[in-house]
Structure formats: structure tokens, C-alpha cells
Image: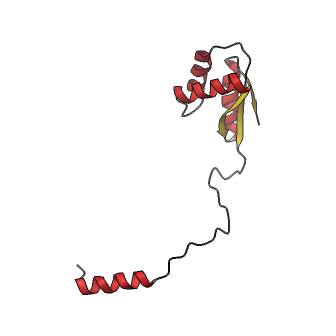
Amino acid sequence: MISPPESARIFAAMAATPQTIPETTEDVRTGSGSGLESRVVVFNCDCHTYQQVIDLFCRFIPGMTPPKAFELAYRIDHEGQAVVYSGPLEHAEDIAGKLAGGGLRVVVQ
């Protein structure tokens, strides 16, 4: 255990040390390492119910929840399209194929 006089000296030394925030010199991103992220875009087709779209999203898109699927379905319905997945090309192509198999209009970008 540190004695009170010693702890006071340590605190005083810490208080005297200038606290500076370093400048950002490089933007470093982490990920798969490929640097290539792909997106699955779903387009409005007016041929599915919200529930059908939500079910497809929850079944085939990793980590998808019903509330998020509803939000995306709403965006597709009102804006004409939405990005429903971003990630490695191989995964994006697999997800797009499954969603297209369910009758959705999709593209991988």
C-alpha cells in the first residue's frame, strides 16, 4: 500500500504532466482485410406483403431482427430501395441469391 505522503507526490507528478490529445494522422479501419465490402440492395416490387419481406430478411440476413426488418421493408416501400446487408462479397452473393429465391428484386453492388 502506498503511504499518504507518497501518494500525494504521485498525484502531484501526474497533475504536472501535460495532457495533450494527439492529432489523427492516419485513418485505420479493421475488417476482413480485403478492403472490399459489398452491399445487397433490395428494390420495391409491390408483390410481397410486409410480413413476407420481414420473414425473408430474418431468415436469410445474419443478425436481422423483426424490428430492423420492418424498418427496412418500410424504407423499400416508401423510398423504392434499401441496403439490407453490407459485408464480404461471398456472403452478399449468398444472401442476395436466397432473397431472390424468395421472389425479391435484389442486386449486389
The residue lying toward the viewer, choosing from 6 and 16, is 16
For residue 28, which quarter of the picture? bottom right
The answer to whether one can see residue 42 in this image is no
Residue 44: quarter of image: top right
Quadrant of image for the C terminus: top right
Residue 15: % across, % down = 41, 81
Q: Nearer the viewer, residue 13 or 97?
A: 13
Q: In this view, does 59 lie above or below 30?
A: above
* Residue 74, above or below 28: above
Look at the image and name its color scheme: secondary structure
Instruction: Tell me the quarter of the image containing the N terminus.
Output: bottom left
Residue sitting at x 69%, y 25%: 76
Query: Residue 43 placed where, x, y %?
Result: 74, 24
Residue drawn at (56%, 24%), measured in percent from left and top? 59
Q: Position of residue 106 (x, y in %)?
A: 74, 26
Left or right placement of residue 3 versus residue 66 in this view: left
Image coords of residue 95 (percent x, y): 66, 30
Q: Residue at x 58, y 21 (%)?
A: 54
Question: Is 2 or 15 nearer to us in this picture?
Answer: 15
**Residue beneath the point at 44% across and 84% down:** 16
As rendered, which of 42 and 22 lies closer to the eye?
A: 22
